[in-house]
Image (cartoon, helix red, strand yellow):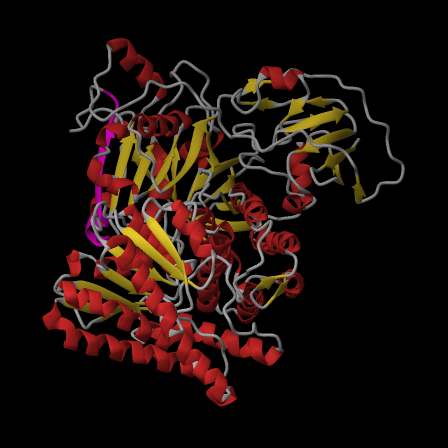
């Protein structure tokens, strides 16, 4: 008699499946295309852990690490192991959206089987429809053992572009897959497998990598290295491979060959058995050197058993080391235990089954860690251990890299996977970008018209909440934006990727950061629409570019919302301006404010000038600063600033002319004569007058530095009067340097490109774009600015202030008459 199983999800949706008495709940769900969170499918990892509200069942066999006796007694179950004895109601620890994804089923032929060592075999599989299977280096599949309904999880060791699939298998006495491979497997056998699975994969970046492999955890690491080889992009990489005994050591010739083929790759190995003939006896942590860590700017990829993963984490923690990225995958040998049968009050049968019901109920189940943290002796490279500690470590950490003692019941080789948390704002979007590039490779060219239509609908749903560069409803944008990004991961059919993305907390981070935000990068919603268009046309290159650019625009939006002033300046040289008197104009916000904060942090005394009274608040914050409110478009205003500096400090050592900025953005013929004059007054006359006011006192003393802030926009569109003004700044810089060199005065300039900044606290002075035509003109100038930059991004305030401070300092004492572009390669 079949039983009806109600699967109640965290979002209030309930789905029903029919389950035969000899079926596990997970198998029944999977066959009916409801994918509850699942990994091992035989009780090894605990990913599918659920709570049984009512009904009777047989718990099945599983690892105690996956489900403790206490949890089982309280009614928690593993759907991958349990079989129903009656109708059931289960609380599932995921949303229904995850359950509606589907991992694809594939078929292949076993074409080669090689015994690499007494404990390890390699198998090679061919597929007739190889193009159907896309995976990322580091992912795995669940393979059904021929002649059984048992599945085992194995990571690819081949690169994604290879025609043949290869896997490494650890042989376990009595293991279902091991018995098949050593007993009855033969070339030509048909294999069925599902996947790919897992969020452990190589992120696309040129950052150095440290690769750590334990036992057959070498397989995904080989896939990663082979992908690095095929990409042709050099990056520093070091691989450490650890095993328990000499019998476990495999693929060393392959590693030697790859070290020749992959630029920048080095490798080493160790064996934990003290009787080993290997040159390195011990654990992988003893082979991690300072030069492999690159001062923290390294991504660590680690695949091995849980104790090995925890040992490496403990090693890093004890050394106070925190890598830029830490990605790991845990696997274990299953040692089944029999769960007690627990009678529960049966649920009443529902005579009218419905495919989906809405339940309003709270959900107390959160995502489960695949393997609990274990207590380990903190390790340091080269640290000596006592005999007792050696014995304990030998039981818990080793190349394979820790197996249970031989006398315990052996099980099967299984893979679990966790994802590290990310907290910093920029890192959140960088991590999302890496995951999305992976999801792109799994989905582009494979989506149905219905899926693409849904993707477009979600992209369009973000549009109403943004108008140009302004949020109309930041909270609604955050919600719809999250749904848009979630959907791509849902389409992969890989719940781990979706969970890895959700674990980043992008939605929560944006909700908190953008709560009171008014500014949004004007390309964000258009990016969504353009990305869908790239998917519709199958344009992989454009889609990849858009994902990367959208991440940068997301960073800019959140940085501006956060302000940035709370963080101190970067790239500091303490004491560089000690004893110097520095005048900074346009100091109340933007580049001027960032420059003032930097010079104050480097010991300078400041006179801060601006037309806004906000400059007084900045002066109050800084240790030695005076504020002057003045209109620098007039001679009295410029003169007042110079006189105030001399009156307070007796001299001016450095003048930073930062006042300026385009007022309007439109074709030149749309400017009126009055508007042209206004642009020249704002961006040229202010600098001319301030130089005229400050030069007499500098010339009298026989020393001084003037740093003018020009622009890379001397060549650009829709702001010609501004461009002319900044061209005048460049001419002024060269001519003043020539004329006043004999007076001991250096005159230099920076030419900033597009620069991100917090929302303006002082009006620009010109009208904001209002009509569709004005917004189009404004957007065109933004596109041209970003497009002209070789780095394809806006600069930061810190980057601009650092260049100004350098030119103003004695470090640039041999630089004069020069305009330094600070525009990501845009030479203006």
Q: Quadrant of the N terminus?
A: top right
Q: Nearer the viewer, residue 380 or 38?
A: 380
Which residue is rendered at x = 44% and y = 39% of the image? 154
Residue 597 horizontal side relative to residue 426, left or right:
left
Q: Nearer the viewer, residue 406 or 674?
A: 674
Which residue is rendered at x = 16% and y = 68% of the image? 699
- Up-down: is 362 above or below 649? above
Q: Is residue 268 magenta?
A: yes
Which residue is rendered at x = 23% and y = 56% of the image? 650
Residue 302 horizontal side relative to residue 190, left or right:
left
- Up-down: is 468 above or below 551? below
Furthest toward the front, the residue is 647
Q: Is residue 584 visible?
A: yes
Provide residue 641's location: percent of width, then percent of height: 34, 63
Marks counted in the figure total: 0
Location of residue 745 by image quarter: bottom left
Q: Nearer the viewer, residue 684 or 473?
A: 684
Furthest toward the right, the residue is 351
Residue 681 horizontal side relative to residue 804, left or right:
right
Q: Nearer the viewer, residue 323 or 192?
A: 323
Q: Is residue 325 magenta?
A: no
Provide residue 209's location: percent of width, then percent of height: 30, 45
Q: Is residue 748 visible?
A: no
Residue 770 horizontal side relative to residue 44, left or right:
right
Please provide the residue range marked out in magenta.
258-273
Which residue is rendered at x = 34% and y = 73% of the image? 712
Q: Quadrant of the C terminus?
A: bottom left
Location of residue 458 by image quarter: bottom right
Furthest toward the bottom, the residue is 669
Furthest toward the left, the residue is 742
Provide residue 678's location: percent of width, then percent of height: 45, 80
Provide residue 378's location: percent of width, then percent of height: 32, 21
């Amino acid at each position: 008699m079949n039983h009806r199983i109600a699967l109640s999800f965290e979002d209030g949706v309930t789905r029903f499946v029919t389950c035969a008495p000899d079926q596990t709940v997970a198998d029944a769900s999977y066959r009916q295309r409801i994918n509850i969170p699942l990994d091992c499918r035989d009780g090894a990892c605990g990913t599918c852990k659920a709570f049984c509200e009512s009904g009777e069942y047989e718990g099945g066999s599983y690892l105690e690490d996956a489900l403790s006796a206490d949890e089982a007694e309280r009614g928690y179950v593993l759907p991958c192991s349990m079989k129903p004895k009656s109708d059931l109601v289960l609380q599932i620890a995921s949303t229904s959206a995850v359950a509606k994804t589907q991992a694809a089923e594939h078929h292949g032929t076993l074409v080669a089987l090689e015994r690499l060592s007494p404990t390890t075999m390699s198998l090679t599989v061919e597929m007739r429809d190889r193009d159907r299977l896309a995976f990322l280096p580091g992912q795995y599949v669940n393979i059904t053992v021929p002649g059984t309904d048992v599945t085992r999880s194995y990571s690819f060791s081949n690169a994604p572009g290879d025609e043949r699939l290869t896997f490494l298998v650890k042989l376990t006495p009595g293991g279902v897959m091991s018995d098949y491979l050593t007993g009855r497997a033969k070339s030509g056998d048909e294999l069925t497998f599902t996947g790919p699975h897992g969020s452990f994969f190589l992120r696309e970046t040129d950052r150095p990598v440290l690769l750590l492999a334990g036992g057959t955890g070498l397989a995904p690491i080989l896939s990663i290295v082979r992908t690095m080889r095929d990409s042709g992009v050099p990056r520093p990489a070091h691989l450490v491979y650890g095993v328990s005994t000499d019998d476990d050591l495999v693929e060393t010739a392959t590693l030697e060959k790859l070290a020749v083929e992959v630029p920048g790759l080095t490798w080493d190995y160790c064996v934990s058995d003290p009787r080993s003939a290997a040159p390195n006896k011990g654990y992988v942590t003893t082979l991690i050197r300072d030069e492999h860590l690159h001062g923290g700017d390294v991504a660590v990829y680690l695949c091995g058993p849980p104790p090995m993963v925890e040992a490496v984490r403990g090693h890093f923690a004890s050394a106070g080391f925190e890598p830029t990225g830490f990605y790991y995958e845990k696997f274990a040998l299953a040692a089944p235990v029999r769960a007690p049968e627990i009678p529960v009050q049966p649920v009443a049968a529902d005579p009218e089954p419905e495919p989906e019901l809405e339940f309003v109920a709270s959900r107390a189940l959160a995502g489960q860690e695949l393997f609990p943290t274990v207590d380990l002796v903190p390790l340091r490279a080269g640290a000596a251990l006592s005999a007792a500690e050696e014995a304990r470590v030998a039981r818990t950490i080793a190349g394979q890299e820790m197996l249970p003692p031989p006398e315990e019941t052996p099980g099967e080789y299984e893979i679990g996977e966790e994802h590290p948390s990310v907290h910093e704002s920029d890192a959140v979007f960088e991590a999302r970008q890496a995951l999305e590039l992976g999801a792109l490779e799994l989905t582009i060219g494979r989506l149905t018209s219905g899926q693409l239509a849904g993707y477009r609908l979600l992209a369009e749903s973000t549009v109403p909440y943004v108008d140009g560069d302004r949020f109309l409803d930041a909270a609604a944008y955050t919600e719809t934006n999250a749904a848009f990004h979630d959907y791509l991961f849902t389409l992969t059919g890989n719940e781990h990727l979706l969970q890895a993305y959700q674990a980043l907390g992008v939605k929560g981070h944006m909700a908190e950061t953008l709560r009171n935000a008014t500014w949004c990068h004007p390309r964000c919603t258009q990016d969504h629409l353009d990305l869908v268009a790239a998917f519709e046309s199958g344009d992989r290159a454009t889609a990849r570019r858009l994902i990367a650019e959208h991440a940068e625009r997301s960073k800019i939006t959140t940085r501006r919302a956060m302000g940035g002033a709370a963080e101190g300046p970067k790239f500091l040289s303490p004491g560089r301006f000690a004893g110097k008197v520095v005048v900074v104009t346009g100091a109340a916000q933007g580049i001027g404010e960032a420059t003032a904060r930097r010079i104050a942090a480097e010991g300078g005394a400041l006179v801060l000038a601006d037309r806004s009274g906000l400059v007084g608040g900045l002066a109050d914050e800084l240790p030695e600063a005076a504020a002057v409110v003045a209109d620098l478009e007039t001679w009295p205003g410029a003169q007042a600033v110079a006189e105030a500096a001399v009156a307070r400090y007796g001299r001016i050592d450095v003048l930073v002319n930062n006042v300026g900025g385009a007022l309007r953005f439109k074709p030149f013929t749309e400017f009126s004569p009055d508007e042209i004059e206004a642009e020249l007054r704002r961006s040229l006359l202010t600098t001319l007058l301030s130089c005229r006011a400050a030069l007499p006192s500098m010339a009298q003393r026989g020393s001084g530095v003037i740093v003018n802030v020009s622009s890379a926009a001397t060549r650009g569109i829709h702001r010609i009067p501004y461009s002319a003004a900044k061209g005048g700044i460049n001419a002024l810089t060269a001519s003043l340097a020539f004329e006043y060199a004999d007076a001991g005065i250096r005159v230099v300039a920076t030419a900033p490109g597009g620069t991100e900044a917090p929302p303006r606290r002082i009006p620009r002075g010109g009208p904001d774009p209002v009509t569709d035509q004005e917004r189009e003109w404004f957007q065109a100038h933004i596109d041209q600015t970003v497009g002209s930059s070789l780095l394809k991004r806006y600069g930061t305030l810190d980057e601009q202030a650092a260049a100004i401070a350098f030119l103003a300092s004695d470090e640039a004492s041999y630089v004069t008459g020069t305009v330094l572009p600070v525009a990501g390669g845009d030479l203006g």
